[in-house]
Image (cartoon, rainbow, N blue to C red):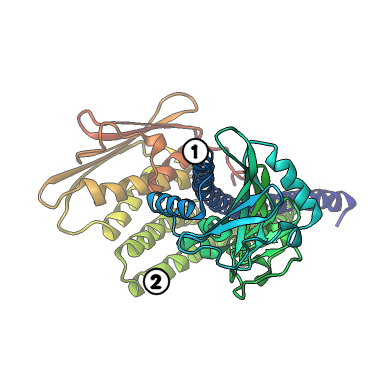
Amino acid sequence: MSPKTVFKHLKYYSIIALFLGAGLFGVYKFVDSHQTLEHQKLDSRLEQAHSDAILRAEAAIEVYATLVSSLKSYTINQETFPSELQLQKYLKDLLKEINFKDSILVNYINKDHVFEYVVTPNEIDVVGLKGISVRSILSPERVEELDELMKRENIVLFSPINLREGWAGFPFNFSARNLDNEVLGYVAPVLNVKYLLDYFYNTKTDNNYVHRFIVNDSFDLTREAYYDGSEIFNNNRDSEYYKNFNVDENNFIYSNITLFGSQLKIGSAYKIEPKIGYTIAILAYVWYCLIALLTIVIFNQFIKNKVLNKRLIFANADLEANLLKIQTLIKEIHHRVKNNMHMIAGILTLQEDEEEDEKVIAALTQSRNRIQSMSLVHEKLYGSKSLNEIKIKEYIEELINFVEQTVGGKEIKLKKTISVDADYMFDGDTTSNLGLIVNELITNSFKYAFNVHDENILSIFITKDSDDTYKLVYSDSGKGLPQDFNISESTSLGMQLIQILTEQLHGTLTYNNDSLSAFTIYFKPLEKSFKDY
């Protein structure tokens, strides 16, 4: 092999390598885009679940606000500060009115930080705090905060606490005053945190998610306990506590809720991180491998064909003196191609016999007829003296007879008109394209246009329109295509094949249904693929 040939082959291989590389990059981008989209869907579902839970929690906060604000309003609007029985009765009526059935504890503490009374809806001083100083329970820092609280008029929420009653609560605090606005101490309603946090677990879909609650960016809060290092009196533990699950903290998304000046940071994550399926990715790469393999095989065959063509050219130059051998060789090629096509058609026939699906059988029949139409070209070239030109009229007549025997029935009466100049001769490529077009049109006529009870008409005209252009008119007596039928938008394989073959002949295709259903094709014969002998 000469250096020039090696260089040309190297150039071809480089092009194929670039093509395959670009294809692999495209598949990678597709797979990456698909994976990204799946991750976005999962993130979107988590964000929606988190957002829904936050909205439900905000509804619970409104209940908290109503409770505490009502208690404050009741205490400051009495002529004298209410007694424990009065406050208990009001508390019971208030809870019944707003249908609040969770735990609540209301403490009234004087200016010296001594419990005056402790009230629940059904009990008074349930744990015996009356007369006990807050200083013995709370840190000096918290006592200082309560001193400041008595000077203000707004409601303040301190950090959650673990109550001796056995539940974790939100301690709301506001200044206790009489009608003269004299400070008497402060009131500390404590509401069960479970009421609020339950709003994150009250739908079926919440079983897929875990939530995390952080107070003032410091400590975890659950429905049963507050983990700030203080003693926990509740023996129950929240089964939905995020530490019970193997969840990476980086998988949480967070939002903040403000509760009377205190910040509650809320996170949501999947209990079990959903897995992204790799079926699409595997299929994409498998298809790429198949296409790459097919491309390499075709390319290698292309190189072999080019080498074979060059050898034939050199052989032709060397064998100019022996025309008979060259003609015999070319005839043998056409004969073998014809035989191979007959073999393929035979295989398709065998496949038809094994199939039961009518659509599959029809597709196999159409494929076999197309192969036979191309095989007939090689048969004509094999019997042609010039080995390069085929009398188109004879070819079309034989093609019609073959299709009529294959697709048509004996019951169909057919009047055929073939108006083609007997001297018109085209090369093998042009004849093959025209044969496939006519094969599709005739097959469609037998399938859709012809009727057993009618006198059916089929006409084919080929005339010369100009020096290098011919006109083919094919018509039948069928009812034709719908008025709004658009050839260029047709999804029919046969119609698409006709359009492609027409374009290969540098032609144009039109259709009308005025008197007869007629296809008109203007085409130019292709340049001959090899010299005449």
Q: Amino acid at mark 2?
A: Gln
In this view of the protein, can residue 383 be seen by the observer?
A: yes
Residue receiving disc 2? 351
Image point 56% across, 64% down: which residue? 125
Image point 83% across, 52% down: which residue? 10
Q: Answer left or right for 205 relative to 326.
A: left
* Position of residue 112 measured from the top left corner of the image (x, y, whole percent): 72, 50
* Position of residue 295 measured from the top left corner of the image (x, y, whole percent): 66, 57
Image point 38% across, 49% down: which residue? 97
- Tell me the tag on residue 174: none
In this view of the protein, can residue 254 be seen by the observer?
A: no
Discs 2/1, front: 1
Q: Residues within 10 Å of mark 1 (few under 14, many from 20)?
A: few
Q: Answer left or right for 163 relative to 419.
A: right
- Tell me the tag on residue 79: 1
Q: Residue furthest top?
A: 466
* Position of residue 512 measured from the top left corner of the image (x, y, whole percent): 28, 30
Q: Residue furthest right?
A: 3
